[in-house]
Amino acid sequence: MTAVPAQDEVTEARERSGPREQVAAAVGLLDRPLTSYYLVLGCSMLLLALGLTMVLSASSVKQLQETGSAYTLFQKQAMWMVIGLPGMWLASRMPVKAIRALAYPLVLLSVVALVLVLVPGLGRTAGGATRWISLGPLQIQPSEPAKLGLVLWGADLLARKEKLGQLNEWKPLLVPLLPGAGLLVLLVMLGNDLGTTLVLLTIFLALLWVIGAPGRLFVGIAGLVCVLVSILIVVEPYRMQRLTGFLDPSGDPLKTNYQGLQGLYAVASGGWFGTGLGEGRAKWDFLPHAETDFIFAIVGEEFGLVGTLVVLGLFGLLAYAGLRIARRVKDPFTRLAAAGSTAWLVVQAIVNIGAVIGVLPITGIPLPLVSYGGSALIPTLIALGMLLAFAKREPGARQALAARGPGPVLRALSWLGLARR
């Protein structure tokens, strides 16, 4: 005869399966050792796939008119992905010592390349900014790897100073970090690149924040940043025009804020669920730079509010994962590099999206992983691979990876006889 459970036991079982327990179970998933690893990997791959799709959609009309093929920029972006993904995989498997060893060579190469950008005949100017080096059919933007170089060099420098106990006074804290970062910022400013200047300053401030710099130091640096930004705005008429258009959107739509208004029209016309992939109208010679700076507007038009919220959610999860890595790892360099990389990618996304929806002035920086451009994509993928390597150093992560067994790449190599079983 089957025993009938007591009423108290039934009530307790119902309470265990209630919303509170479900929330607790979801929170428990976030406490797992490999949570950061899978969040970084998953968000990166989803944003990368979305970016490749949107580059095709946003550029197809213009490229069909100019080159006769709607797939020109799509193929180039796919090629950059083919180059960047192995770099991401290699970075995810590199030891921290090897990553630190790249700091000084990368920052030195960045300085040399930024100097070459300013050389007449080598540097290429577009949109009011001199950002690119022309090497035949290739165009390289040195300011993008300079972001990664500043993250690694600054993290290595401050980690060494922390180990030596040299962070108690402002002079040992800022020298040579401030002059080095200032040199990169100056070279980028000479190329009239306001957006990258702001990102480099963000990385610099993020490193100081993580290391525990005093508040008065941030006040002084914030004042210096305001002065630098004001200089960049005043010396370039087009930048002043952008600021005027931002402050007065009702001005002349054909002069002061044409691009911003077209971006807002594209986002607004998407409604809740969008017009459908490839069905947007803004890319038909209405919205300038639809595949780069304003690709988020095409996302809003073709996927609607739901699509834009998905993109925001992915960047939010990426920010959570990066900060979780920085909080849980023990090594100072790893903590600083994780925080600096996260600040770089998330703030750049915020500035780009804010410009598209009209809450920030237009600065001309791409949306990470989504906008077209190999110079931005490859350093971003390497930085994300670096975050994956750092995530493996969280407490319990190595044991969890060992218990999981070899990944699909290693399994495939083993099946082909190219790796030890």
Image (tube, helix red, strand yellow):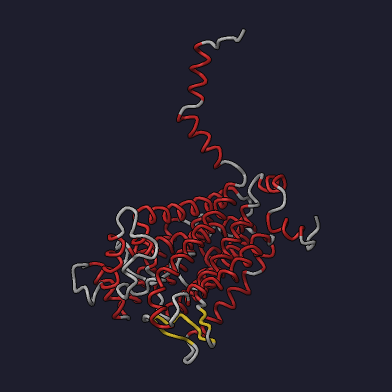
Q: Residue at 35% of width from left, 68% of height from top? A: 226
Residue 16, x across and y down, in percent: 51, 24
Q: Residue at 31% of width from left, 67% of height from top? A: 263
Residue 287, x across and y down, in percent: 32, 72
Q: How many marks?
A: 0
Residue 330, x across and y down, in percent: 63, 50
Horizontal side, residue 223 vs residue 122: left or right:
left
Q: Residue at 52% of width from left, 60% of height from top? A: 207
- Give the residue at the far top of this rendering: 1
**Pick the front one: 247 or 166:** 247
**Pick the front one: 203 or 386:** 386
Vertical placement of 259 versus 17: above or below? Answer: below
Vertical placement of 97 versus 33: above or below? Answer: below
**Pick the front one: 385 or 201:** 385
| Residue 206 seen | yes
Quadrant of the frame with the N terminus: top right
Residue 240, x across and y down, in percent: 28, 76
| Residue 179 seen | no
Vertical placement of 49 versus 184: above or below? Answer: above
Horizontal side, residue 102 vs residue 298: left or right:
right
Quadrant of the frame with the C terminus: bottom right
Horizontal side, residue 48 vs residue 127: left or right:
right
